[in-house]
Amino acid sequence: MSQGILAGLIGRGIQASRTPALHEREGDAQSLRYLYRLIDADQLGLDDSALPGLLDAAQRTGFTGLNITYPFKQSILPLLDELSDEARGIGAVNTVVLKDGKRVGHNTDCLGFAEGFRRGLGDVARRQVVQMGAGGAGAAVAHALLGEGVEQLVLFEVDAARGQALVDNLNGHFGAGRAVLGSDLASVLAEADGLVNTTPVGMAKLPGTPLPVELLHARLWVAEIIYFPLETALLRHARALGCRTLDGGNMAVFQAVKAFELFSGQTADAGRMQAHFASFP
């Protein structure tokens, strides 16, 4: 392959991201000229209105594709020419392929979370699950959870309109009543089988927990999508109680596997990418 691949990640507070090394190492293993760059709006001192300009610049300078992370997974939608069926259904994009003058949005988060969930929590009870957050990543995770057989998903989201929009989307796809907006977190969590955090609370740049840890109990399984740090405060408290837990590493790897394939046109070696991820300090 004579032509190289130039990819990037647009987001905020992404200096600790393992995504560039994950893509570049797999590129090396396949003898591809593969460069992956961080485009960190925080570090560049840019507000959210800079997103169209960043996308224009990437297209103009010959980027093959972009990954999109917090907080741009939904605000990027009107800037794209086409959406994959999955991205359209979820209403969020984390991967953009730039080809033939077009910007095509995809969602590899849903597949990434589902694969990690099957591998790490494949046998857990899923009658009722609480999800914190209904943003771009939250939309993908909610689709994955209902697709993996969660009977009812109870969403807690500070932006009520955004939460209701996701509930309506999910019930349209999976059937009435499969998703509801929660109001009393303590009582719902006391009866729930599982808890998933899709908010950014717990990231290195936003330390803390997305809910009072006193509400956790040993019967819960607890999943995170954050992977820097890999062990968030929420997971640490959950493990101390004896909860089954799932960190954000698998989702990070498996969404990257699919994004690599979309950017390069080559099949990625998922096992090798998992090993790369595990080897990072």
Image (spheres, rainbow, N blue to C red):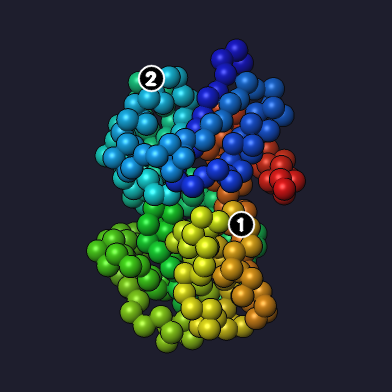
**Quick one: 200 or 64, which is closer to the camera?**
200
Residue 253 at what x, y percent from top left?
61, 47
Q: Is residue 271 visible?
A: no
x and y percent of residue 101 in the render? Answer: 35, 21
Crowd around label 2: few <14 · some 14–19 · many ≥20 (10 Å): few
Which amino acid does the dot numbered 1 rest on?
Pro
Residue drawn 56% across and 34% down? 260
- Seen from the viewer's position, the closer of residues 195 and 110 is 195
Describe residue 93's horizontal placement relative to residue 118 as left or right: left
**The quadrant where residue 199 appears:** bottom left
Whether residue 138 is visible to the viewer of this picture, yes or no, is yes
> Looking at the image, is 276 positioned above or below residue 185?
above
What is the quadrant of residue 56 in the picture? Answer: top left
Are there few (<14), some (14-19), or many (20+) residues within 10 Å of tag 1? some
Instruction: Please give left or right for residue 14 compared with residue 29 in the image.
Output: left
Q: Quadrant of residue 158?
A: bottom left
**Where's residue 35, x and y in %?**
58, 26
Could you tell me if the residues under marks 1 and 2 are in contact, i.e. CB atoms within 8 Å? no
With respect to residue 175, does 24 lie above or below?
above
User: Mark 2: which amino acid?
Assistant: Arg
Which residue is identified by label 1?
A: 229
**Label ID, residue 60:** 2
Report helix, strand or loop for mark 2: helix
